[in-house]
Amino acid sequence: MQTYHRYLLASCALLACGVTFAQATSPEPEYQITFNAGVVSDYRVRGIAQTSFKPALQVGADFVHKSGFYAGTFASNVRWVKDFNGATKGSVEVDLYGGYKGQISPDLSYDLGLITYQYPGNNSGDAGTPGAGAFSNASTTEAYGALTYKMFTLKYNRSLGNFLGNLNSHGSQYFDLSAGFDLTHGFTLTPHVGHQLIPNQSLPANYTDYSLTLAKDMGNGLVLTAAAIGTNAKRSFYTDLNGRYLGRDTLMVGAKYTF
């Protein structure tokens, strides 16, 4: 009987080890789909106000394949197409993007892709709208590439057509350098500096933007953020039709839930 008990215990131990081993080596899922929703007090893109200093509601979805391929979408309310470009339509931004991420070495990775910023129904630059002839359609497509070394990321974007409605701005470029520092306890600090180049404009359109973002992971998919954002954008170019300087310094707060 004792021999039987020893055999039974040994069998159970092996079974338990087998279960543990199976759990530890469970196959990586082929792909993952996530959704997100959030709110920000002042929606900024490259330091420039998109909602005329008003809050924005934002939603998105992402598909990531284990091969490195990814695709996603993002949507937000905006005001700049009307307030800056003088359009009468164009209150929503819808982004579509896709690309491929890969590893060069354990500390070095890359990201290549395309993104299009669409403003459905916008009539920026259409005849009969205020400012007609000064702008083209606001929708924009860019190609991008990025290299990440440890916590540092250098990214480059280049427009494939006119940039955000600016005439003759094909080939606009954006250089982005950022870093992510894990402060432990769910806190992450992200400094950033970027430089936007928009060619062939009658007023100075090139500028540098900078930000410092503190994020707190609250768990269960909720992340809170606070960001100090500024630019040296020229008032002569980045003042809207209502006299608001869209590049002014700001403190933005936000919340995002991913599920």
Image: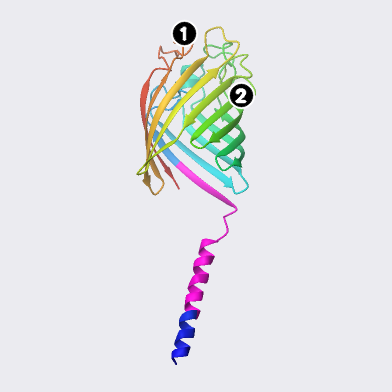
Q: Secondary structure at mark 2?
A: strand
Question: Is 190 covered by the magenta stretch?
Answer: no
Residue at 54 percent of width and 43 percent of height = 62
Find residue 2 and name its label: none
Q: Which residues are magenta?
A: 11-36
- Residue at the farthest bottom position: 1
Three-letter residue code for mark 2: Arg
Percent x, y for residue 57? Answer: 42, 34
Q: Residue at x 58, y 32 (%)?
A: 146
Residue 209, how many percent across, how many down?
A: 46, 20
The structure residue drawn at horizontal position 38% and vertical position 48%, both measured from the top left corner, is: 219
Report the label total. Answer: 2
Residue 40 vs 34, above or below: the answer is above
Residue 27 is one of the magenta-drawn residues: yes
The local crowd at label 2, few if under 14, some if 14 to 19, many if 20 or more residues have their Cα within 10 Å, is: many
Vertical order, 84 against 227 (above or below): above
Q: Can the viewer see residue 45 in this picture?
A: no
Q: CA distance from mark 2 to mark 1?
A: 24 Å
Which residue carries the number 2 mark?
158
**Where residue 213 sits: x, y (%)?**
39, 31
Q: Which amino acid, mark 1?
A: Ser
Single out the residue that lies furthest toward the top. Answer: 202
Callout 1: few (<14), some (14-19), or many (20+) C-alpha neighbours within 10 Å? few
Which residue is denoted by mark 1 in the rendering?
A: 236
Query: Foreground mark, 2 or 1?
Result: 2
Q: Position of residue 20 (x, y in %)?
A: 49, 67
Sequence-wise, which precedes: disc 2 or disc 1? 2
Of residues 188 and 171, the one drawn nearer to the viewer in this rendering:
188
- Residue 12 in the figure: left or right of residue 145: left
Q: Secondary structure at mark 1?
A: loop
